[in-house]
Image: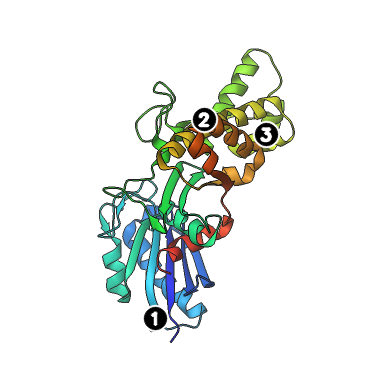
């Protein structure tokens, strides 16, 4: 009998389950709100139901499933499958998720940090195909990363590798959620871009300048409502302040990526989320900064490109762990 695999994607707002064949082709999927405030027991019971529902939609029996992959925000232990207090999942304190799923379904379970699983998915199904050393970075609420070398995730000594967003660029810079200051994430994540935009608009208003008008109009005239997507839209319209903010973001991202290029010497760096939405508006100045800041040989070897899987990444990340 042809074997199939189940994938589970766990986020603070959404749970998703998918069933795929042995090539990674998605056969069925189910999405439901996490309702994280209800705690881990509710989420686990919901996941059990969702897995069975997803198998039903694919007209499959549980006996046809050979493995289950789980992509979840960390910190977590990939060996034991214990999840330790992810920031967006309150109450998930040392939750033995692997053991619970294996007990419920009698299927081998592999659990991985979501950024690592995403990197592996891009390596196997997306923009990383054909490359040996891949660095994947997401630019969204935070800046996460995953490293894949010769088809294997590099996890480090205790599953902590890939925290690319927490390299410190400005020791006296803005505070970061990790407790440090001036991290790449505190400068270039979506909320960080919005914060810098709001401060710049306020400064212009104070100085009686008007070049922030486009950004303000996009946010309905409310500075506190300015988001990173407003900055992208205004930059495409040629707004001077928005373009300045994009170039600053590219400078810091390029600086951070150059550090990683020197250390890892990857074939390719794939950038997700905000970088995909911005395209060459952001990617070209990032490439320029990397070429200026990185050492010549690793800079010449690396390709910097947008990630390719887009909306399918959440489905394929857990599947990539088990096919």
Numbered tag placed on residue 154 in the rendering:
none
Element assignment for label 2: helix
Report the residue marked by disc 2: 252
The quadrant of the picture occupied by the C terminus is bottom left
Residue 194 visible here: no
- Dot 1: few (<14), some (14–19), or many (≥20) neighbours within 10 Å? some
Report the residue marked by disc 1: 62
Q: Earlier in the sequence, mark 2 or mark 1?
A: 1
Q: Earlier in the sequence, mark 3 or mark 1?
A: 1
Is residue 286 shown above or below 27?
A: above
Which residue is at the front of the view, 159 or 38? 159
Element assignment for label 1: helix
Could you say which quadrant of the image residue 300 lies in? top right
The residue sitting at the top extreme is 207
- Choose mark 3 or mark 2, whichever is in front: 2
Mark pair 2, 1: CA separation: 48 Å
The quadrant of the picture occupied by the N terminus is bottom left
Element assignment for label 3: loop
């Amino acid at each position: 009998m042809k074997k199939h695999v189940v994938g589970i994607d766990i986020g603070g707002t959404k749970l998703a389950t998918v069933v795929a064949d042995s090539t990674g082709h998605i056969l069925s999927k189910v999405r439901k709100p996490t309702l994280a405030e209800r705690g881990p027991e509710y989420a686990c019971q919901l996941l059990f139901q969702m897995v069975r529902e997803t198998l039903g939609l694919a007209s499959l029996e549980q006996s046809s499933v050979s493995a289950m992959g789980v992509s979840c925000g960390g910190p977590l232990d990939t060996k034991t499958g214990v999840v330790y207090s992810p920031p967006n999942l309150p109450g998930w304190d040392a939750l033995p998720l692997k053991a619970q799923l294996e007990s419920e379904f009698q299927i081998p379970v592999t659990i991985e940090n979501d950024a690592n699983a995403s990197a592996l998915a891009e390596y196997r199904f997306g923009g990383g195909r054909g490359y040996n050393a891949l660095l994947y970075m997401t630019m969204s609420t935070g800046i996460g990363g995953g490293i894949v070398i010769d088809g294997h995730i590099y996890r480090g000594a205790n599953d902590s590798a890939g925290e690319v967003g927490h390299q410190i660029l400005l020791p006296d810079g803005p505070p970061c959620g990790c407790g440090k200051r001036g991290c790449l994430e505190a400068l270039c994540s979506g909320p960080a871009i919005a914060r810098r935009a709001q401060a710049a608009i306020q400064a212009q208003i104070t100085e009686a300048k008007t070049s922030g008008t486009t950004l303000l109009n996009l946010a309905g005239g409310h500075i506190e409502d300015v988001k990173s997507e407003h900055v992208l839209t205004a930059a495409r319209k040629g707004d001077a302040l928005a373009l300045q903010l994009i170039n600053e973001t590219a400078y810091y991202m390029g600086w951070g990526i150059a550090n990683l290029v020197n250390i890892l010497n990857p074939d390719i760096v794939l950038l997700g989320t905000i970088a995909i939405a911005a395209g060459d508006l952001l990617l070209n100045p990032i490439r320029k900064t990397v070429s200026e800041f990185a050492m010549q040989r690793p800079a010449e070897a690396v390709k910097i490109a947008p990630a390719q899987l887009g909306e399918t990444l959440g489905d394929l990340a857990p599947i990539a762990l088990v096919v």
